[in-house]
Image: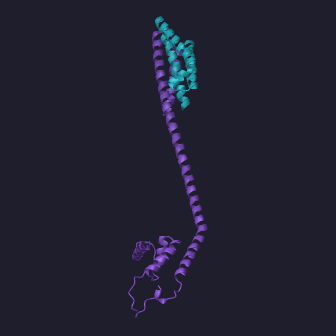
Amino acid sequence: MHLKLFVLSASSVVLWLIPLSALDKTLDIHKALQGVSLTAAIACAVTAGNIARKQAEQNEIEEIKTRAITADVVDEIATSAYISQQQRQQEAEQILSGQPEREEAVEALKRAWLLDCKEPSEPVTEPLNQPHDNALTVDEERFTNLNLTKNQAIELIQKMRSELNQTQTIEKLWECKKGGSEAWKRAYAQFKSLMEEGG
Amino acid sequence: MRAIHLANYFVAGCIAFSLLGWVASLHPIAFRAVLCLLAAIAISWGLGWLLDFSLSKLLNISVADLQALLISGLAMLLIGLGVFLCT
């Protein structure tokens, strides 16, 4: 493409200057040749100009593409750097704030445990006591792993709910992890029924 | 590449004015016709300078570009006719 461009440019100048200077203007044949060569020179110059214009436009497009790719790469690097910095910051914040949260949870559990694990004065209402084998009591439904009665369970849940959320409360009282396990489903159902009855 | 593109168009303009001189040398009537054409070009050129701001808006180019076009047109005319007359 470049060779064609330069050949056309050079030929246009040659076809313009050489016939005008070398040929005689008084002779008709020479004059005709001059006219033909000038016309051909114009054609060559215009063609070369068009080729150069297209080439210049392509070069501009390539330059824009290169600039866009460079900008994309720079943006990607900056974004990844920003994200990794955010992640590091979040991890650091979690590490810094993790200890007090655990301590708070432990405190809440301790308080809940102390509140509900006091020995009651009357053994009949003791929730943790197993019913006597020879006692003539009606089998009352028991809740949670602490084997609490309904009212005790509701009371304990209400106290714990001021410190813990629903999932934490269930996990602590029924000693099961959240998920699709049968224990969790049963615990959740019990918890729901207790909450409905407890208001 | 842009300079080559502009230079080629400039050379094409110069050759066009040489061709105009060649046409003028063919016959006295052609000479008069070319003189009329040159007069019209001269008037247009002068009006182009006078109305450069309006023309630049009309052609959607900057005033500087229009002035560059006018100057290069004059240069093409001088070079083209000069080459034809001096050879």
| Farthest bottom residue in view | A134
Residue toward you, A179 or A63: A179
Residue toward you, A171 or A21: A171
Q: Quadrant of residue B72?
A: top right
| Farthest top residue in view | B28
Chain A: its colour in the image is purple
Relative height, residue A150 to residue A165 (above, below): below
Please state if B52 lies on the left or on the right of A133 as rendered.
right
Relative height, residue A80 to residue A179 (above, below): above
Which quadrant does the C terminus of chain A fall into? bottom left
Residue B8 visible: yes
List x then y, in percent, for residue A164: 52, 71
Residue name at image x 48 percent, y 5 percent? B28
User: Total of numbered circles in the picture?
Assistant: 0
Residue toward you, A16 or B70: B70
List x then y, in percent, for residue B74: 57, 17
List x then y, in percent, for residue B29: 46, 6
| Farthest right residue in view | A96
List x then y, in percent, for residue A113: 53, 80
Residue toward you, A187 or A38: A187
Chain in cyan on the image: B
Residue A13 visible: no
Residue name at image x 46 percent, y 21 percent? A40
Q: How is the image coloured?
A: by chain
